[in-house]
Image (cartoon, helix red, strand yellow):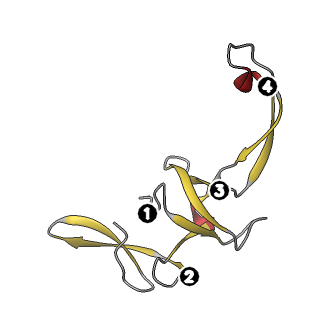
Amino acid sequence: MAVKIRSGDEVVLTSGKDRGKTGKVLRVDPKKERVYVEGLNIVKRHQRPIPSADPSKSAGGVVEREGPIHISNVMLVDPKDKKPTRVGISREDGIRIRVTKRTDSKLD
C-alpha cells in the first residue's frame, strides 16, 4: 500500500487516547504503516545512564517520546479550511501530485 502521508504534513488523530489533536508528522515508517506525530501518543521509556563525555546525553531515567501511530488512525489536515481530509493522487505532465479530496488543493 502506498503511503500518502509524508513527514512534515499536518495531521489530526481520528482515534486513540489523543483523538482530535493535531500535530506535525516527524517520520513515516512505510513498511510497518506507522507515523510518528510531534506531541502525540507520548510513551515513557526507561533509559539506562550511558557514560560519555557529554553529560546531557548520559543522563538516565524515564524518557518521554512519541510512539508510533497506525496510518489509518490519522487524517491529513486540509491547508485551506483546516479540516481533516482524504488524500488523492492526480497527474500533471506525468508527475504524481498529492491533492486533497475536500477542496482539491495541491499539497506538493
Instruction: State the residue in front, 7 or 56.
Output: 56
Dot 1 crowding, Cα within 10 Å, few <14, some 14–19, many 20+: some
Gap in angstroms between the C-alphas marked 3 and 1: 15 Å
Amino acid type of the residue tagged 2 in the rendering = Lys
Q: Which residue is mark 1?
A: 4
Upstream in sequence: badge 4 or badge 2: 4
Please state, as top left, top right, bottom left or bottom right, where the C terminus lies in the image. bottom left
Question: Which picture quadrant has residue 49?
Answer: top right
| Lower sequence index among marks 1 and 2 | 1
Q: Which mark is residue 59?
A: 4
Mark nearest the camera among 2 and 3 is 2
Q: Label 3: which residue?
A: 69
Of the residues under marks 4 and 3, which one precedes in the sequence? 4
> Residue at position x 72%, y 45% from top?
65
As drawn, the label of residue 75 is none
In the shown orientation, is residue 81 left or right of residue 94? right
- Mark 1 against mark 2, which lies toward the viewer? 2
Residue at image location 47% in from the left, 61% down from the top? 5
Residue name at image x 75 percent, y 17 percent: 50
